[in-house]
Image: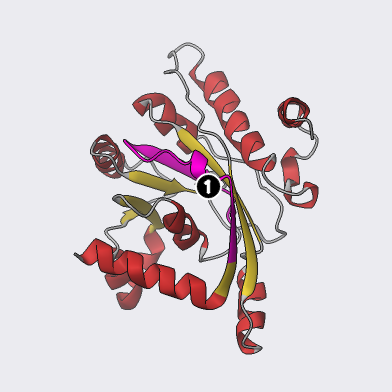
Amino acid sequence: MVNRIARFLNRLLLIAILDLEFINLESAPRDGGLIVAGNHLGVLDALIVFYVVDQRDYIVLVAEYHRRYFLRRMLVKAANALFVDRYQADFAVLREVIRRLNNGGVLMIAPEGTRSKTGGLQAGQPGTAYLAAKTGFPVLPVGIVGSQDRLILRNLKRLRRTPVKVRIGDPIYFQSVSRKDRGDQLQTYTDEIMCQIAALLPEGNRGVYTNHRRLKDILFDKGT
């Protein structure tokens, strides 16, 4: 019941302040565990992705420093989100994420680790690739354009909805990594995830992956 109410309120909020356009929404898997990886522009990104896959348990990781604020702590608890230390391995959180994925949950994660101040992609961190390789669950790349906090706040002051475009890619599957080449394999997987996200974004938002060889191959295969 709580999850159903949260989904309803989430839709109301987004419809009220955003003019959302979803592209290729039908490619999002509907069954089993899923890791949704997207670029990170603003605080509403997780809610936007929740809109895409809101029929299941959704798993959100929240930076540990938010725990010190009472209201944020209560919101995290209400949303069944998980506090995580971004700078140290948190195996308890990892085990809980895997448990919920195995039960059909959806992990929403920003491989960049933090919001982009420029709107362009930053270098991806290996955590997303590690989870995908360890669990075998697919990664669904998502590219979001227009969700920067400053744009939304500016339009709210003018009583306008902010246009936000959400492009959904095709699921990516990764094999488990070997101990011998673990670092190189995780880097390759991370580059694949980030380049798949970059391919969903306009050229001006591709950031550090603009000239990446793998991105060029993806765009060539797509005929763009």
Nearest the viewer among 99 and 56 is 56
Which residue lies under the disc numbered 1?
A: 25
Tell me residue 206's x, y (percent).
73, 46
Tell me residue 38's x, y (percent).
55, 47
**220 displayed left or right of 92:** right
Tell me residue 23's x, y (percent).
60, 49
x 74%, y 47%: residue: 207
In the image, which residues are magenta?
20-40
Nearest the viewer among 175 and 57 is 57
Tell me residue 91's x, y (percent).
29, 38
Nearest the viewer among 49 and 191 is 49
- Residue 120 shows in this picture: yes
For this orientation, the residue located farthest to the bottom is 158
Q: Is residue 45 magenta?
A: no
Q: How is the image coloured?
A: secondary structure
x 63%, y 73%: residue: 162
State which quarter of the image contains the C terminus. top right
Residue 222 location, quadrant: top right
Task: Say which element carries label 1.
Answer: helix
Residue 145 location, quadrant: bottom right
x 40%, y 44%: residue: 88
**93 displayed left or right of 25:** left
Give, as a three-letter code, the residue at label 1. Leu
Count of marks overlaid on the render: 1
Q: Is residue 21 above or below residue 143?
A: below
Q: Is residue 16 above or below residue 188?
A: below
**192 displayed left or right of 134:** right
State which quarter of the image contains the N terminus. bottom left
